Image: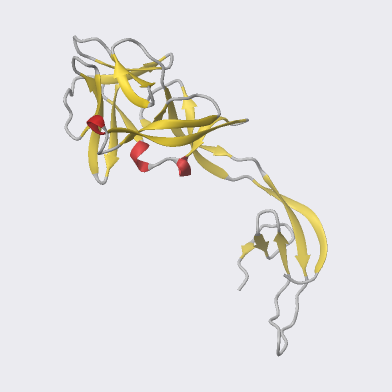
Amino acid sequence: IGEAVYTDTKSVDVTEQEVYMLTDTLGEGEYIIVNINEAGEGYALAYDSTGTNNVGKAAVTVVTDDNGTYVLADDVTASSVVDSAAYSTSGYTLTMSIDGTTYYVEAYGSTSALHIASTQAYSARYWTYSASQLGYEGSTNAIHYIIYSSDVFTSQKSSGTIYIYEKTTINTTPHTHELTSVEAKAATCTEDGNTAYWYCEGCGKYFSDADAANQITLA
């Protein structure tokens, strides 16, 4: 890098991170449906063409810190993302976009089966979420609730517990640059030269100024 003249703390970067945050409210937005509500390894409901009624699961890691309880968006597979849109003032439709095709998340039938289907079977039915229960209602039949049981996502007519996480943005833990000043050096016949710059080993970024205001890339 060159000869270090001094090291000094100069600035703080606050970066934003997309996450799916645990919530107790279902509204219009982007969600994942998860079997746990605390830090650890869990599963999100996912589309799986090889699963029963296209129902599958994808592994997720739930994190809990000062920001709350969440899953990093970068760790969520596209097949787990659920879009919620208002059906009426009473509830919401839940869909997944798989390779350009819209799939509807529904639960119905005498066996209370959970479906992820490209054809909407009951357009007059909708989802609501309350007290960690995600229920599919709007018919004369009993409400069907999504649950996670025996290592699979399914549904049942009696109430059951499941958790929803909504996509949002948080501020991650601020990073304080510890800058090392590198002197300008003239080029020689055998070595390249460089202008003066500052380097933070903690984040690997280079700056043209001591205030870390102007990030640069070394040639």
Residue most toward the right? Answer: 6
Q: Nearer the viewer, residue 175 or 75?
A: 75
Give the percent coordinates (x, y) of residue 170: 55, 37
Number of numbered markers = 0
Give the percent coordinates (x, y) of residue 151: 39, 26
Q: Nearer the viewer, residue 98 or 193?
A: 98
Give the percent coordinates (x, y) of residue 92: 30, 24
Q: Nearer the viewer, residue 99 or 17?
A: 99
Residue found 25% across the figure and 34% down from its top: 54
Q: Is residue 199 above or below residue 68?
A: below
Q: Where's the C terminus, which quadrant? A: bottom right
Which of the 4 image quadrants contains residue 58? top left
Give the percent coordinates (x, y) of residue 200: 71, 58
Q: From the viewer's perspective, tell me whether residue 202 is left or right of residue 156.
A: right
Which of the 4 image quadrants contains residue 40? top right
Q: From the viewer's perspective, tell me whether residue 29 is left or right of residue 38.
A: left
Which of the 4 image quadrants contains residue 216? bottom right
Residue 30 in sight here: no
Residue most toward the front? Answer: 150
Q: Is residue 51 above or below residue 182?
A: above
Q: Is residue 124 above or below residue 119?
A: above
Residue 132 in sight here: yes
Residue found 19% across the figure and 20% down from its top: 124
Q: Is residue 4 above or below residue 145?
A: below
Q: Where's the N terminus, which quadrant? A: bottom right
Q: From the viewer's perspective, tell me whether residue 55 is left or right of residue 16.
A: left
Residue found 55% across the figure and 43% down from its top: 16
Residue found 75% across the figure and 72% down from its top: 2
